Amino acid sequence: MGLLLHSNLPLAAAAEGEGIGWNIFFYTGLTIAVVLGFAALARKGLNARVYTSLPSRLAEHLYLFLEGMTVNVIGPQGKKYVPFLLALWSFIFVGNIMGLLLAATPTADWSLNISMAIITVVYVQYEGIKQNGVLGHIKHFAGPRLGGAMVIISGLIFVVEIVSECMKLVSLSLRLYGNIEGGHIVRTSLDSIIAGIPIGGILLPIKFFTCIIQAFVWTILTCTYLSIATSHGDEGEHHEAHGDHEQHPAVIAAHA
């Protein structure tokens, strides 16, 4: 029923305040409330380290999935980032799902996505500084140490890397916005073909799959950024592990 209501209410109408209306603060707050409510139910189901309720079992599987992904990309030391990644995945997934049930989707608003991208990139820089110190973190943007006239190359690499860090904001936010908002546009177009018949509902399985994939892509890219920002602290095994992580199929698929 929620999908039918959603299908009969074009995004343009929602933005103008018809029906439920588009209010980014309302939908963002609702998303946070759902995530916190689910977390409370999952914690309540924990009894003597045994997950007894459905929310707690789902939370356990999600945590283990993200933990495995983080260890594969960053290494065992990456387990400390799982709570942050869990918060990101949960918020993005629930926000995406809102579009299947209600009149609008918070993650289809670019302002929210760019805010999450800023939080993600700033957190990555913070962890890089925490791991390697301010100077060590800045130096890694210049690539390997070069002497003589080759220092010019290091300068160029530094500029390219800084621009690349800034472009992560655009890449993360626009990827999520484009996929979620694009699905709404296609659905609205299909609904307008035959008046009163929400044939856009046939896209429900695809859109649900997109909700999961986009949450996964954001978290796997965050893992990659954290791996790059923190791995240069140890000269030996971290560099070797980083080389393996770049070849990880999940990382390659996310960048694609």
Image (cartoon, rainbow, N blue to C red):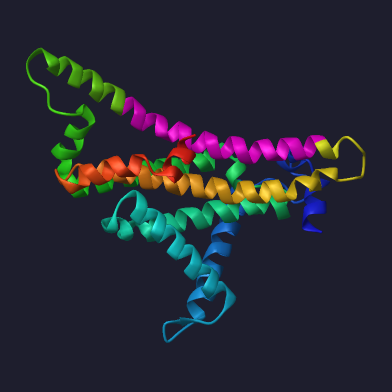
On the rendered structure, is 17 left or right of 138? right
How many numbered discs?
0
Q: Position of residue 130 (x, y in %)?
A: 20, 49
Identity of the residue furthest to the left in this view: 148
* Placement of the N terminus among the 4 image quadrants: bottom right
Q: Is residue 210 above or below residue 186?
A: below
Residue 57 in percent (x, y) is at 53, 73
User: Which residue lies most toward the right here?
Assistant: 195
Looking at the rendering, the stretch of residues picked out in magenta corresponds to 162-189
| Figure quadrant of residue 221 | top left
Q: Which residue lies at the image location 80% right of the left edge and 34% below the top edge?
A: 189
In the foreground, 61 or 17: 61
Quadrant of res 86: bottom left
Residue 66 locus on image (x, y percent): 43, 58
- 118 in magenta: no
The answer to whether residue 233 of the structure is visible from this angle is: yes
Residue visible at 52% across and 55% down in the picture = 91
Q: Residue furthest top?
A: 149
Judging depth in this view, the residue of 194 and 26 nearest the camera is: 194
Is residue 184 magenta-colored? yes
Give residue 14's position: percent from left, percent from top. Answer: 74, 43
Residue 212 vertical position relative to residue 108 in the rendered view, above or below: below
Say above or below: 128 vs 159. below
Q: Main secondary structure of the magenta part?
A: helix
Question: Horizontal placement of 84 versus 128: left or right?
Answer: right
Answer yes or no: is residue 125 visible. Answer: no
Task: Judge by depth and name the residue closer to the eye, 91 or 33.
Answer: 91
Which residue corresponds to the image point at 7% horizontal and 15% vertical from the top-left? Answer: 148
